Amino acid sequence: MTAQSGQPQLPWWETGIIYQIYPLTFADGNGDGVGDLRGIIDRLDYLNDGNPNSVSSLGIDAIWLSPIYRSPMVDSTYDVSDYTDIWPTFGTLDEFDELLAAAHQRGIKVILDLVINHSSSEHPWFVESASSRDNPKADWYLWQDPVPGQAYPNNWLSYFGGPGWTYCPDREQFYYHTFHKNQPDLNWQNPDLRAAVYDVIRFWLDRGVDGFRLDASSAYSKDPQFRHNPMKYGATSQNNYKNYHHHYNKNLPANHQIIREIRALLDSYGERALIGETFIDNQMYDSISFYGAKGDELHLPLEFEFPLCAWFPGDLQRAIEKKERLTPTFAQPNYFLDNHDIPRHLSRWVECSLCIDPVTIARAAAALLLTVRGTPILYYGQELGMVDNDDIPQDRLRDQVIVISDTDDTPPSRDGSRTPMQWDASAQAGFSFGKQVEPWLPVHANYKDLNVEAELADPDSILSFYRRLIRLRRNSPALLQGSWRSLLHYPLEYLAYLREHEDETLLVVINFSYEQPFDCDDAIAPDGWEVLLSTDQPEGQTVALPKTLQPFEVSIYQHSGATQ
Ligand code: NOJ
């Protein structure tokens, strides 16, 4: 718990910053070209060395590790063939324990990615289930008989494209897979399967992990009658997943019961965080429902509001306002810009914005993420300004599970945003600690300038800006616990909002455009604002609010008295 003056103590996932590590490409400790646990251990000090005044660490509070379990790697670790062992290329259980201890020693919490909507088709559970109709695990997956006159048992498609059903000759039945055919969905209606998954959860909690990110956590339950999903109004193609309302295979009431059970299990271990991927047909309301009516489901339901926004103040503010309105009072919002499934924000936004310098967008986006009300989740390398590698040769691509459907323009590979972390200017960006081995994915060509070592040495770098923001946030009651209120009704050129707390009021101004007057809809005190952090003004001075915003200026002010 984090103590603030006169305030109730808050759990770490409300005050902390979570950092997503994609283990395949974060750091390669043994020099074989693939990221591993040893590499993460060796790089922990960069994330947080335990010293709040460190001159070389970022200062995050928790790491979320994308899956580290045994996997045939059809979906780059999201197809698990053994939930209680480490993929040998990543290391061993002993190394995991070492990582956990080393992280805890530095005050870093460890969150595992739990992929329990589906397993790999190579998981022994599925191999047994698929072998006959009457084995002990026959009912652990979603099996259906062929329907005369129909190609598949129903019209459910795979999120990755193509049919959601694959035929198994040994059973003369189809099994359902929300994702790839090598990722069969588990049957959560089966009590033995449920108990087995809860044993997996206990296995990791007993080892000391601090929480989980539940993969695809809105898709666990399926309609027991396997009814067809209705198509969306106006949709023409029947072969596009996005053209359906997923009423019968996502966000069913029974799904919430499962999350409640998992949460109760976590709660029995004390302060453990439950995060979940709850993106459902772009509807934030459904995602909000995953807090649970009594706050007994997810602590942090992950929703893609910033990734779905244009780089435009009005759009971003509308997303924040919506979240402010919908988040229950007992609950904590969260935000992220990037993850391993989408193009990085600088790749998404730079080309589409008026602003041609990515550094200005990177700074503005960092300020937004770290000063809005909610838990920020960073994706490795975003703090450097890493962008997608769009030049990966076809024969080097790893992610090839997504099939483009006829009306879908989703890129077939997500590898562009999964390239090796850029540590320094040595061979392969220091990913293999200087060794010249071919990495899992090709390093981005910009690594000589854009890397941790270079940016730590440059006070004007994106990394330095993140570090300043993180330190400011850590010591600010307003940023950690204050309310959020915009000063503009519908901003066109810049964001201006207050974070208000009984001990402190902060004003955040982020200019998305060229020089312009600062002209709020809501009146606030003109004088007495101390500049805490700014891209354009001397810090530490108390000023009257600037009447002019500099091009792409980001400034954070603190006010000691009444602001209105
Ligand atoms: C969501 C994960 O984030 C994504 O990477 C994966 O492909 C699917 N779930 C299937 O596990």
Image: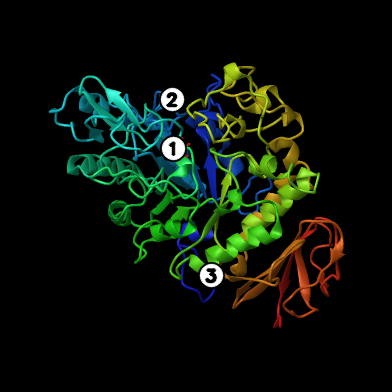
Whether residue 184 is visible, yes or no, is yes
Q: In the image, is residue 251 above or below residue 97? A: below
Which is nearer the N-term, disc 1 or disc 3?
3
Q: Give the class, few, some or many, for how many residues have Cα within 10 Å of label 1's Cα (few <14, many ≥20).
A: some
Which is nearer the N-term, disc 2 or disc 3?
3
Which is nearer the N-term, disc 2 or disc 1?
2
Q: Choose mark 1 or mark 3, whichever is in front.
A: 1
Q: Amino acid at mark 1?
A: Gln
Q: In the image, is residue 14 above or below residue 429? A: below
Residue at mark 3: 4
Q: Which mark is residue 238?
A: 1
Say whether residue 31 is left or right of residue 385: left
Q: How is the image coloured?
A: rainbow
Q: Quadrant of residue 147?
A: top left
CB of residue at label 2: within 8 Å of ligand 1? no
Q: In the image, is residue 43 above or below residue 71? A: below
Q: In the image, is residue 287 above or below residue 138? A: below
| Residue plotted at (37% across, 26% down) | 182
Q: Amino acid at mark 2?
A: Val
Q: Quadrant of residue 203?
A: top left
> Helix, strand or loop at disc 3?
loop
Residue at mark 2 to residue at mark 1: CA–CA distance: 26 Å
Q: Amino acid at mark 3?
A: Gln
Instruction: Ligand 1: give its quadrant.
Output: top left
> Helix, strand or loop at disc 2?
loop
Looking at the picture, how far across and down is residue 309, in whole percent?
Answer: 62, 52
Q: Are marks 2 and 3 in contact (CB under 8 Å)?
A: no
Whether residue 509 is visible, yes or no, is no
Looking at the picture, how far across and down is residue 534, in whole percent?
Answer: 78, 60
